[in-house]
Image (cartoon, helix red, strand yellow):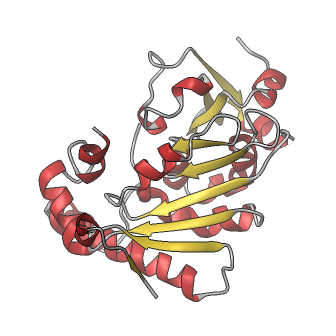
Amino acid sequence: MGDAPLNVGMEPREQFLMPDLQAGALGWLLSHRLLGALTHGNLRRARAFFTLSASMKNGKKRWLP
Amino acid sequence: MPGKEEIERDPQWLPHRVDMQTRCMKFLYIERVALAPQFLADLNPAQSLDEAWLPLSDVAAMQPKAGPINFIFHTAFCRSTLLVRALEIEGVCAGLSEPGIFASLVNVGEPAHGLVKPVLDLLSRPFSTDEAVFVKPKNHANMLIPALLDARRDAKVILMTSELETFLGSIISGGLLGGGGAETSILS
């Protein structure tokens, strides 16, 4: 089963040469941009926005704006 | 070989992949009890009890008994799999983790847009009366979110993410496609 491509507007060769961390960070930023747009728009259907991160390990939970 | 009517009626027939060359959609038969422990995108015919192909025109014409559908959208490595598995409560709601059909719809692109609503209606078929469905698409399909929300305006959404540092740490430990990252480790 194939995965959906990451489209960051780069040349295919440049994108192919990106290391995993760089590609991952770009994908993360794109997703945050999209999810942020959803939460700041008029999407009343988005009930919650969690961050479960390193701070969660200490029993803390932080809500994003 | 099941007929179109049987696939339309039984929610255990999950849409799995689109083939634009043959203009058909692949369905896999997955029993309800087998939903929770696995990423549906990784299923292959050997792991499903049966498989079937239907013409896209038949899929688009389907009018299944759709039920409530809710989404978990996420940025990966943020415990979204843990949540969808926690929401897999028989008789209350079904948690579908990363159905393969979403990546397929993204890969096909514009020609598949007319299939989004029929696919969501098929995925939302309740497994029992009044049962809701939670669907967690793979984060690779996040670009499909606007189309998904437009197709099912009744859907509720949970958005999940993690800090970039934690995310990158998960890639280092588990690879970009997961397998040994944060989600796997907390579930194992």
Q: Is residue A25 left or right of residue B157?
A: left
* Residue at point 18%, 69% (across, down): A22
Asked if B128 appears above or below A13 in the picture, the reply is above
Number of marks in the rendered image = 0
* Residue at point 41%, 49% (across, down): B82
* Residue at point 18%, 50% (across, down): B175
Quick check: can you spot residue B182?
yes
In the picture, the quarter occupied by the N terminus of chain A is: top left
Name the spot of residue B151 as percent of width and height, x first.
74, 62
Asked if B27 appears above or below B45 in the picture, the reply is below
Q: Is residue A24 left or right of residue A19?
A: right
Which residue is at the far top? B1
Q: Nearer the viewer, residue A27 or B171?
A: B171
Name the spot of residue A53 as percent of width and height, x first.
28, 68
Q: Is residue B3 left or right of residue A64?
A: right
* Residue at point 62%, 28% (across, down): B27
Which residue is at the far front? A59
Q: Nearer the viewer, residue B185 or B73?
A: B185
- The image quarter containing residue B33 is top right
Name the spot of residue B80 as percent of width and height, x first.
43, 55
Q: Nearer the viewer, residue B3 or B43?
A: B43
Q: Is residue B59 left or right of residue B70?
A: right
Asked if B102 appears above or below B41 in the picture, the reply is below
Name the spot of residue B126 as percent of width and height, x first.
75, 39
Quick check: can you spot residue A18?
no
